[in-house]
Image (spheres, grey):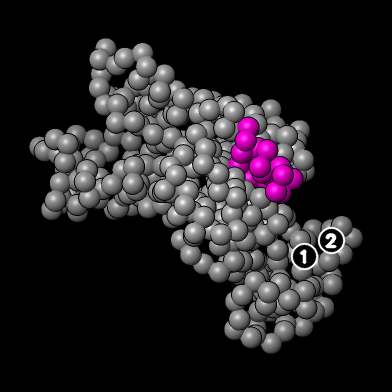
Amino acid sequence: MRRAAGTILSFRPLPLPFGNEALHPQRREIEKCPPPARTGATDRKTLRSTAKLSGVVNIASGVHAVEHSEDGKAQMKITLEGKVALVTGAGAGIGRGIAQAFSDLGADLVIAEIDPAKCAQLRADFPNAEVIETDVRDRAAVERVRDRTAARFGRLNVLVNNVGHHLNTFKTLDQMEDDEWDAQHDINLRHMFLVTRAMLPLMRKAGPGGSIINLSSIEGFRGCPYNVAYTTFKHAVTGFTRAMALELANDEIRVNLIAPETTDSEQVPLKHIIKPGMEEIANRMLPANRYGRPEDHAGAAVYLATDLSSWVTGSEMFVDGGSHNQNIFKRTPEGRWTVMGVVTGSASAAD
């Protein structure tokens, strides 16, 4: 997901209620500024200088309005410049997509990744990032990430708890061993406790406006057989998110979660899990007519990381192609939705 830092979206300023001009003197000033000539340049330096010339209203951290369009509209610049963001498990898939999006928007990145080869690649791709080889299931390792973040940046604005895995533990509960249950707990829930607890002092030091984003799963909102442990701990992420949103309210740190449906990634490679020639049939299982891509979740994370979502906390964002909404409805080959479909086969390569 590559784009120039400071993606520009247009919007029209809303009229303020009577008397609000006194609270927003910048609005009067910005309306006096004539639109500057368009240069066509999109680099960060030009965007910043254009904003300075035309008058910037700081609506919220990471979101700025700039009156410089040809037709007199105000424009909104989405940026993470000046923000420090930690993304766990950013070596591939959704985590990698989020790290790329945050980098493109100007964030200072800290990346915690367990795989040494992926760490080497991340250092090459993000030369300004603090990439730390880390097992987030280990308290001492997590505290080293905290210490290195503090030493380099002195604060943390955004935390993305991205790590999670089904561990290929597909069996019934009576077949599951104790250590398999514990492993699911460690990688899908316990690490969020360890990382969040360790990073809270740095987030409080950054001041109001922080954001914690927990990656869960659509399986955290429905029953999923043959991996009860995974489903259980993904449900628990919802409780963790909601409780922490209240606990951190006085610190003005928001806590939300993203719930992905099946997303094409290293962990879930669609080319290996869908039978050849069955791709179109498999895609029609979802209302959006396709499975997820890492950039789908990166867009959601950008929204939750910036003050575009400043009034959103304790919430779940379903990035699932409409899967949660469709519930038990299935689509026939003719395109009709029904709750009385008859299963005649499977597109899964495992069947």
> Residue 125 appears at what percent x and percent y?
49, 60
The answer to whether residue 288 is seen in the rendering is yes
x, y percent for residue 271? 22, 50
Count residues near mark 1 (Cα–Cα under 10 Å), then give few for <14, some for 14-19, many for 20+. Answer: some
Numbered label attached to residue 24: 2
User: The residue under label 1 is which amino acid type?
Assistant: Val
User: Along the line of sight, which residue is nearer the eye, 17 or 152?
Assistant: 152
Quarter of the figure with residue 77 = bottom right
Residue 22 on the magenta span: no
Which percent across, then down, holds residue 48? 71, 72
- Residue 170, quarter of the rendered image: top left
- Distance in Å between CA atoms under marks 1 and 2: 9 Å
Part of the protein shown in magenta: 143-159
Contact between marks 1 and 2 (CB within 8 A): the answer is yes
Which residue type carries mark 2? His
Q: Is residue 161 left or right of residue 168?
A: right
User: Which mark is on residue 160?
Assistant: none
Q: Nearer the viewer, residue 36 or 111?
A: 111
Task: Name the disc covering residue 57, or none.
Answer: 1
Whether residue 258 is visible here, answered yes or no, is: no
Does residue 72 lie above or below 22 as drawn? below
The percent position of residue 347, horizontal first and vertical second, equals 16, 43
Which of the two discs, 1 and 2, sits closer to the camera?
A: 1
